Image (cartoon, grey):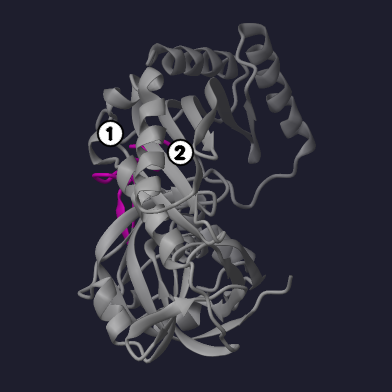
Amino acid sequence: MNKDITKNLTEAVFKKASSLSPDDISVITAYVEDSILRFSNNSVTVVDTSKEATVFLYLTKAGRRAMGATYAVDPSNLDNFVDRLFTSMKFTEKSEEYVPLPKATRIPEARSHYDANIEGLKEKISDQGAAAVNAALAQGAQRVSGAVTATIQAYSIKTSGGVEASDQRSSITINVRAFSSTGSSGHGLSCSASLRNFNAEEAGATAGRFAQESRKTGHWEEGEYDLIMGPTVAANILQMVGYSASAFHVDEGTSFLVNSLGKKVASEEFTLEDCGVIEGGFGGRSFDDEGVPTQRTSIIEKGILRTYLHNSSTAKKYNTSTTGNAGILAPHPWNIVAAPGKMSLETMIAECKKAVYVTNNWYTRYQNYVTGEYSTLPRDATFLIENGSVKYAINGTRISDSIPRQLMNLKGIGKERKWIEWWEVEVPTNTPALLIEKARVTKAQP
């Protein structure tokens, strides 16, 4: 990867912005290169590569703020972009949230995880898709579809606070859906920051196995069930906890963690962290949008909410320090990590008298941000558990519950964790399976 792309663009935009004499400047340039393979009905359908550079710019003048981004990175367009953004501040109100950008703090060079083997995978990405398809077929699947995405990213930042740093990261993900002869389906997933820890074959085998195991379906009734969330489903819910921990969302009234600092918000067995850079993680970088070094932040520790995620503006309001999670406007999580528990999936199933085991889900929607009430639709293999064993697969389910209630009613936490990032999980999340007591399961409307 040509890391000079980001450094040169960042320097050019910073120089132009400086000539206009703003009070604060933060320039971040991101370069992203994706290699994508799509396969359907057991065959490759699309192989593509995309490259894109994006410049993000934040400016202030006399308490007024402006921010913007552009994909048009040739010199004339960049100059015009900076001029227009600076001029736009004339038409904005002075911001009550304004805080000067932090002064430079030493940022370790390139702390994120980067695997050059992913950059060199372009010609061999079809091998990963073939491995997944063959593994699913070996489990008895009839049709297999999915996608492999290999991504390399480079970032550079320069601020008026004296910060100047670069970082890079890599990731590879595969999503596999397998279908049996009866139309039942299963989902498999593998995500990694390195090729070494990536396993397309395992993802395919998991999808194929779930498709076969869910061929037998049976009757079920609406009501309360203990709920086993596989890691893919658990990650979808836990990223919402990460978003709700943003001090911006707390102030905005779109968080279910309002007025909860220092209070019990989950089972005492539950601990959740945000990590800017962590072994295996692929969502963070070594600096945030203000040029502050990212860090490991304990959000929930043994059931107690320890902190919100902050940038400099929200930290000032709460009389605390930034946690290195800026977003200029809204702090956000980088990599969400749930502590492992002590239960195997088999033990979870064995301890359930009446439960539903959900392996995948989609269309998760809030009904109420403040109470954390939401609904989601289980997808692919979903199983009814009775008296400690799987009875058969069930279809047409909807989970309707609240996240705070689920966190407080955790009966078990898996001991094996899995990194998850896909369509429904934007923030890379490392989580085990979760066992939740008495969730409401209803019929999904056709």
Q: Which residues are magenta?
A: 274-298
In-front residue for pair 2/331: 2
For the residue carrying disc 1, how many other residues have a C-alpha within 10 Å: few (<14), some (14-19), or many (20+)? some
Image height of 420 relative to 350, above or below? above
Residue under pointer 2: 290
Observer able to see residue 429: no
Query: Which residue does the image show at 27% across and 28% down from the upper left?
Result: 115
The amino acid type of the residue labelled 1 equals Leu
Q: Secondary structure at mark 1?
A: helix
Is 241 situated left or right of 40 in this image? left
**220 to 146, vertically: above or below:** below
Q: Position of residue 33 (x, y in %)?
A: 47, 23
Type of secondary structure dominating the magenta stretch: loop
Q: In the depicted view, which residue is nearer to us: 235 or 158?
A: 235
> Please, which residue is most extreme toward the left here?
342
Q: Which residue does the image show at 59% across and 21% down from the upper left? A: 21
Residue type marked 2: Glu
Q: In the displayed orientation, state which residue is furthest to the right.
A: 91
Quarter placement of the C terminus: bottom right
Q: Which residue is mark 1?
A: 195
